Structure formats: structure tokens, C-alpha cells
Amino acid sequence: MKFGILKDIKDGEYRVIATPAEISSLTNDGHEAFVQRGAGANAGFSDEAYFAEGATLVDTMQEIYSQCDFVAKVKEFESCEYGLLRENQIVFTCIHPAAHPEEVQALLDSKCIAFTAEDSHRYGSPNCEAAGKQGALMGLESLQSIHGGKGKFVNGLGGAPGVHALVLGGGTVGQAVTSVLCSLGARVTVMDINIGTLRSTAVQFQQRVFTQISNRYNIAKLLPSVDVVYNCVKWPKNATEFMIDREMVRSMEKGSVIVDISNDYGAIETFHETTHENPRYIEEGVVHYCVSNIPGAIAQSTSIAYAASVLPHFRSIMNQGVENACVKDGFLRRSLTAYKGYLTHEETSGIQKRKWVRPETILKIKDRPLDMAPPATATRSNDYYEEFQ
């Protein structure tokens, strides 16, 4: 199979989906690898390093799309790529389909086979860990007076108290944030809707964190006394109210900070997406850091960890085919987003009111012994294509 790595073109994105180490594995499996020149340069991987592992270097994304059976990148497809997608071509990237209807339509129109990477991780995405750890540092930096923050140092000074941080969400991202903050001596409160998660978090951090059930009442009560809030919650895209509304933001001390790592519209009323080039804005006296691709700031570390995590998916698909790969790994199967013109992603169906078909149905594997995985989100849909009901 011909496998192609694209250079990501999203503003401020420096990661690469595969390093020379993954190219070595794929070429040793007997596949051909094509790499767009400069794809790994911003993460510290030279074209020469890819070439040394057997990759063919090409100049443009058009060459990758036209030549390769399997195309991979880190971030969503940009509009300039829509017309390059081909029927039966396998594509793998972080599509975030429920939030991008035009992108989904392009995938369906092309009749390609698309996997959304963020739903494929059995043990949590390395990107989530990276976003949490680096996001923790960005929040502390945003507290500095030079950025409009109140000017508090993380673990305080003699006679001056340190930072009190509120981490919303105790999943992979929240745990990563908490690990950095605790290591640096901040006072941390973690909120989650799951009491079991809170218990395990307290144990994990040796009872050095405070825990509370996450609800609007508890958040509102705590906000006036915290210095920095980290949103690590994957907020339902069809939610009807904000987790933190404008009035709650207004209750925070001037110069406090909100770091929205999850970047889901609808969670925080004062949120809007920012970039690495212009990462902060101040609203209601509170500094907001809302960069959508925080892991891009530590591109080499994230690329190495992320590429290693997705290589088994690449090898499984390329060596055994889409159907067999989806039989053996339920997390890969649930990440199948579009298959030859049909939507196969339940959350996208529920949010965008589109018809869909379960991956195991359209792949004709539902009678085989399947590896199982929990649904990627709580959004459900019974709006099936008539021919698959």
C-alpha cells in the first residue's frame, strides 16, 4: 500500500503524524511511504531522516493525495483539501466531525474511507496529555502581570501565597494538568461529575488535591477564590446551557485566568478560539487563553508520542485491511467516520441531524467476534439510513 504523510497547514500547527521511526516500520512491512517535504521540519525531523528510512519525498499535498492509498495528518482537513480526496482513499486525522459539517460533507462527497483519530485511542490520546501538561504551564504564564494577569507565582514566595487552580474534568487532560500543577506546588481543586474519578484522583496525587463534584453551584461558589481555571471537559455540542456563563466569569478577581484546553464552544460563554500567534484576550477582567492546538507548542515531544500511539492502527489497516482492523480493535472501529459516501459516526449524526450507519453493519462484520469499545461520547442517534435499518 502507498502511505502518505501530509505537512499540516493549520495556522500554528507544528506536529507531524509520523516520524522516521514509523516510516521505518511501514517500509519494513513492504509498503511504500511518501512524505511531503517539510512535513516534520517544525518538529525536528528532517526530510533526509525520512529519506534514510525509505520514504519518497514529494513537493506538494496534491502529489500525496493523487498517489497514495492511505493519507494521514494531524489536524482537520482544510477547505483547499476537500477536492483532493478520492473515492476509496483511506484518510486518518483529527477530523472532529461533529463540529465541522462542511468537512463531513466533503468526506461523504468524495466517497473516501475516513477515520477520526481522536476517537481511536484505547488509553487516551498523547495529544490530550500534551495539551494538559503544556496548558498547565500556559495558564501559569498567563497569570504573569506582563500578560494582564494578577501576578501570582505558582508556589508562592516567603510571606506571599501561591496559586489556587481549579481543574474541571478528571480525565486524561485534567490528570495531566494536575500533575504539572502539583509538581510545582500549586493548590489544586479538581472537579468531575464522577465520584469514582475524584476518589482515584485523590489517591493518584497522594491526597494533595481537593476534590468536588462538578456542577454549576459548586463552580460558581469557588470561582471568586481561584486564580486560574482549566477547562478539561469535553462539553456536549448540543448542550443548552453554559458550564460557566458570563456572570460567573465576572465574579472572578480581575487578572484571574481561564485556560480552555477543550476548546468546545458552549462550555464557557466568554470563549473564542485563539492561536499561538495571538493566544490571549481579556474579557470581564479575566485573561483567557484559548489556543486550539496547544500540543503544537511542544511539537517534537507530542509528535513522537502521538506517532507511536497511532502506528498500530496504520499497520493493522495496511497489513490486514479496513474490515479486519475494525474487527480486532473496537476503538478504531468507533473512529470510522465516513465509508464510501455513508456517515458512520454516531455523534455527528446526533449533532448534525444526518442519517448514519453503524461501522460493523456497513463493513459486514457484525456477525464476527468483535473487540468492543465504549461509545466515544454520550450523544446517541437512531436516525439510520433506510437501507440499513
Image (spheres, rainbow, N blue to C red):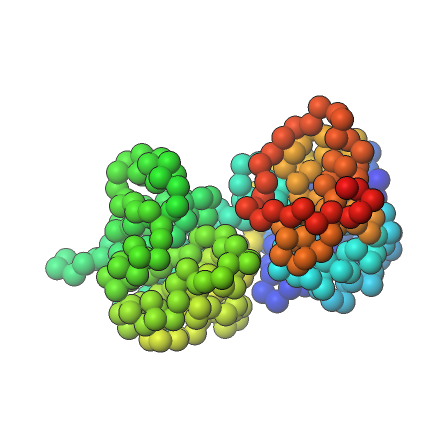
Residue 184 shown left or right of residue 373 in the figure? left
Q: Tell me if I can see residue 129 in this picture.
A: yes
Q: Is residue 57 above or below residue 206?
A: below
Q: Quadrant of residue 362?
A: top right
Q: Tell me if I can see residue 23 in this picture.
A: no
Q: Quadrant of the N terminus?
A: top right
Residue at image position (50%, 70%) is: 272
Residue farthest to the left, as pictured: 159
Q: Is residue 24 above or below residue 188?
A: above
Q: Position of residue 115 (x, y in %)?
A: 71, 46
Q: Quadrant of residue 152?
A: bottom left
Q: Position of residue 184 (x, y in %)?
A: 30, 50
Q: Position of residue 200 (x, y in %)?
A: 36, 35
Which of these two is toward me, 132 or 168? Answer: 168
Q: Is residue 86 above or below residue 23?
A: below
Which of these two is toward me, 232 or 46? Answer: 232
Residue at image position (63%, 50%) is: 347
Q: Quadrant of residue 82?
A: bottom right
Residue at image position (29%, 68%) is: 252
Q: Quadrant of the C terminus?
A: top right
Which of these two is toward me, 21 or 103? Answer: 103
Q: Position of residue 113 (x, y in %)?
A: 79, 47
Residue at image position (71%, 23%) is: 369
Which of these two is toward me, 258 or 8? Answer: 258
Tally of numbered discs: 0
Residue 374 shown left or right of residue 162 in the figure? right
